[in-house]
Image (cartoon, rainbow, N blue to C red):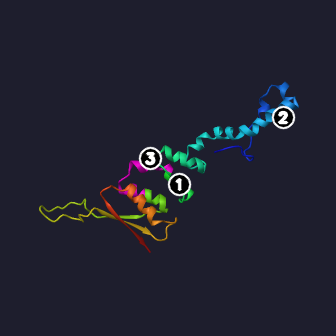
């Protein structure tokens, strides 16, 4: 919860808004100055309201609430701040391409910091010869190849959770960490 902050500058004083007769009264000015400190954080929020709805600039504690607006139930606290902001900023885009290779690549690249290589089984290929053998592998599976030296620390269980949430339900997957 936000409260008073001694470092928040007061954009204007309420005493300056009073009629001139009260501005000359020392007691009235001291009395009204008490409200300056209490109301400065509120005015600061109102003056910067557009930044609160922008994931790039929103305060970190507000980012979780902003994430709920775009369908992210809970932000993973172990993720770096820039990855959280990137995920919230691109959540609607990710949901619109969920279940596709490009959607999975985009979601994983937010988590690991670079785009992984995804190899599909080829089960959706076609053959030019009639009554011939079907091309590709009939096992609906894909492999996610992740470099071992990624910009961000990668946890295999979290990577697996992201893949399960972003892939088509009928597809199996495996994760390979490459040197």
Q: Tell me the residue that label 2 is attached to.
A: 30
Q: Residues within 10 Å of mark 3 (few under 14, many from 20)?
A: some
Q: Residues within 10 Å of mark 1 (few under 14, many from 20)?
A: many
SS at mark 3? Answer: helix
For residue 89: magenta?
yes
Which mark identifies residue 27? none
The x and y percentages for residue 174 are 36, 66
Q: Tell me the residue that label 1 is attached to.
A: 84
Which mark identifies residue 92? 3
The x and y percentages for residue 88 are 50, 50
Which residue occupies 71% across, 43% down? 4
The x and y percentages for residue 122 are 27, 63
Q: Residues within 10 Å of mark 2 (few under 14, many from 20)?
A: few
For residue 98: magenta?
yes
The answer, for residue 119, to whether it is visible in the render is no
Measure how far apart labels 3 and 1 are at the Cα level.
14 Å
| Mark closer to the observer (1, 2) | 2
Mark sitting earlier along the chain (2/3)? 2
Decide which of 96, 156 is in the foreground and name it.
Answer: 156
Measure how far apart labels 2 and 3 are at the Cα level.
50 Å
Asked whether, in this view, residue 121 is left or right of residue 147, the answer is left
Q: 85 above or below 50?
A: below
| Mark closer to the observer (2, 3) | 2
Which quarter of the image is occupied by the N terminus?
Answer: top right
Badges 2 and 3: C-beta atoms under 8 Å apart? no
Magenta residues (range): 88-106
Measure how far apart labels 1 and 2 are at the Cα level.
44 Å
SS at mark 1? Answer: helix
């Amino acid at each position: 919860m936000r409260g008073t902050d001694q470092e928040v500058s007061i954009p204007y004083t309420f005493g300056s808004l009073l009629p001139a007769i009260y501005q000359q009264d020392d007691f009235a000015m001291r009395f009204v100055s008490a409200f300056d400190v209490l109301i400065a954080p509120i005015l600061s929020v109102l003056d910067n309201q557009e930044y609160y709805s922008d994931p790039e600039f929103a305060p970190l504690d507000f980012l979780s609430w902003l994430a709920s607006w775009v369908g992210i139930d809970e932000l993973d606290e172990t993720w770096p701040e820039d990855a959280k902001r990137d995920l919230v900023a691109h959540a609607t885009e990710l949901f619109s391409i969920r279940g596709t290779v490009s959607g999975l690549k985009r979601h994983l690249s937010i988590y690991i910091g670079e785009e992984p290589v995804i190899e599909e089984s080829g089960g959706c290929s076609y053959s030019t010869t009639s009554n011939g053998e079907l091309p590709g592998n009939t096992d609906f599976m894909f492999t996610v190849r992740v470099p071992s030296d990624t910009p961000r620390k990668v946890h295999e269980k979290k990577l697996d959770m992201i893949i399960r949430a972003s892939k088509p339900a009928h597809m199996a997957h495996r994760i390979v960490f490459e040197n």
